[in-house]
Image (cartoon, rainbow, N blue to C red):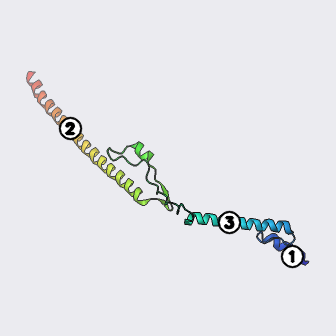
Amino acid sequence: MRRTDAVDAVAALDPIRPDPTMGAPAMVMFLFLVIALAVVVAAVTLAVVGGGDSGPLPDAEPERLRDSLPPDRPVGRGDVERLRFPLVVRGYRMAEVDDALGRLGAELSERDARIADLESALAGARAAVAHRHDRHVVMDKPAQEEQQ
């Protein structure tokens, strides 16, 4: 393998190192691109760090829960379907998710208790009606036997 073949092989494998056979115009273009890249990086760094009269960039407002659960009425199916949590670096804000789940859990417990109360009242009302019906039927039977 000749030396120029080895140089060509190394240059083909290393895209950052300019090819020694590419000539002066290509070398000037390569240096221009490197300098332009350095200028852009420096300008962005100065803008972010706070160079200039405007001062540093303002802090971004944190995303907050959109379409939160209504505080003045019970939560409905549509409220839960519209509930969206903002994304953060590691998923969702745990405090906002915990608050929403706590609220939903409390409302479900209230509804379960209300359903149990209503079912209990319904069972009591049915038992009272059945007891009255049984007593009424029992009272009617002796009266019918006496007439015969």
| Quadrant assignment, res 115 | top left
Q: Residue 125 carries which label?
A: 2
Nearer the viewer's eye, disc 1 or disc 2? 1
In the image, 140 versus 128, the foreground residue is 128
Helix, strand or loop at label 2? It is helix
Which picture quadrant has residue 32? bottom right
In this figure, which residue is indicated by the disc labeled 1? Answer: 6
Callout 2–callout 3 Cβ contact below 8 Å: no
Q: In this view, does 71 lie to the left or right of 24?
A: left
- Residue 59 locus on image (x, y percent): 49, 60
The answer to which of marks 1 and 2 sits earlier in the sequence is: 1
If you read the primary sequence from the N terminus, does the residue marked by circle 2 or circle 3 appear first?
3
Q: What residue type is labelled 2?
A: Ala
- Residue 95 vertical placement versus 9 (above, below): above
Q: Identify whether 148 is placed above or below 79.
A: above
**In the drawing, does residue 139 fall left or right of residue 48?**
left
